Image: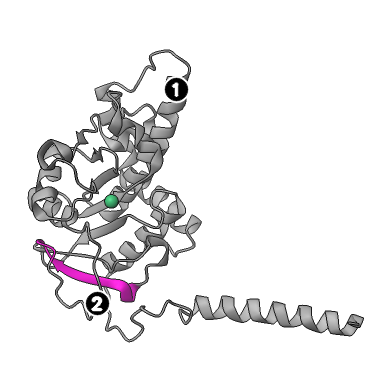
Amino acid sequence: MKTKDDIHNERREICRTIALGAVATGLGFNRFAWAQDDTKPLPEHIEFQRLVAANRILANENVVDAFGHVSVRHPDNPNRYVMSRALSPALVEYADLIEFELDGTPIDAQGRRGYGERMIHGAVYEAREDVNAVIHHHAYSVVPYGVTSQPLVPLTHTASVIGKHVPVWDIADKFGDTDTLARTMEKGRDLAATLADNTCVLMRGHGAVVVGAAVQEAVISAVYLEINARLLTQALSFGETPKILSDREVELARNTQFSSLGRDRAWEYFCRRAGVEPI
Ligand code: MN
């Protein structure tokens, strides 16, 4: 029979194991076998540090889950972009970042595999000189607006950042029955054409793409696209036609949200909530 001391010691051992596991995870020792712990990371750059923060924020705010990804255009070479190796955004660290040509060719993959749908990012950078960050996600609250005729319209001032119009890209229009993933440049370019000069585009039966002039803006727009989708679903459930923001209200509110004051305040908040230092 176990004595009180035995039980106490067993409990202490369990606590010790949990604590050691937590420390090991924090130090990055507890990664999966395929993690590249000997990877030579990209040179230190504030934009790449922000990219790591963006990954953590998007996971923390339920924009991405196991899937989804975010990239930044290379600040020193507009013909390249940087994003994580294929990994859930919540787990991304600096050493996971890889540089790519716009056509999706990795510069120095060091055996790491890129996301299958990274072509979306290159195709958007190719089409939009003003875009320096791209997010692709599957946030489930937006999906109903990609499969019905109900447009995803901004209805609250903080969500004005999503823009007046959110178009829908249907992969089947040009490519027929597929797994709905945009894994080629041809599909990425078709999607970028539907995005046109908007901030967001929905992908029918799949998710969305959100872009920004800076990674902070893309992240803020992606977070509020998800929130706005939930609010719109609520408003529509009342059975009335919601009074949405006018085009002019969207412009004015967007300017306020993306003033340096508004942008930095939101970025700092989302960084802290995600447990990363605001940078
Ligand atoms: Mn996807």
Residue lying farthest to the bottom in this orientation: 38
Residue in front for this viewpoint, 158 or 66? 66
Q: Which residue is mark 1?
A: 235
Q: Label for residue 190?
A: none
Which residue is at 42% across, 38% downward?
227
Q: Which residue is mark 2?
A: 42
Residue 242: which quarter of the image? top left
Which residue is at 8% across, 48% downward?
127
Tell which tag, 2 or 1, sits nearer the viewer: 1
Which residue is at 25% across, 71% downward?
113
Look at the image and tell me in which quarter the C terminus lies.
Answer: bottom left
* Percent position of residue 12, x then y: 76, 81
Q: Earlier in the sequence, mark 2 or mark 1?
A: 2
Amino acid, disc 1? Ala
Residue lying farthest to the front in this orientation: 177
Residue in front for this viewpoint, 117 or 153? 117
Q: Is residue 267 magenta?
A: no
For this view, does 56 lie left or right of residue 134? right
Mark 1 falls on what kind of element? helix
* Percent position of residue 28, x then y: 45, 79
Residue in front for this viewpoint, 17 or 48? 17
For this view, does 183 lie left or right of residue 97? left
Mark 1 nearby-residue class (10 Å; few <14, some 14–19, many ≥20): some
Mark 2 nearby-residue class (10 Å; few <14, some 14–19, many ≥20): some
In the rendered structure, which segment of residues is drawn in magenta? 94-104
Q: Please determine whether, in this image, residue 260 is positioned above or below residue 49.
A: above
Q: Is residue 255 visible?
A: no
* Percent position of residue 98, x then y: 23, 71
What colouring does the structure picture have? one colour
Q: Is residue 95 magenta?
A: yes
Residue 247: which quarter of the image? top left
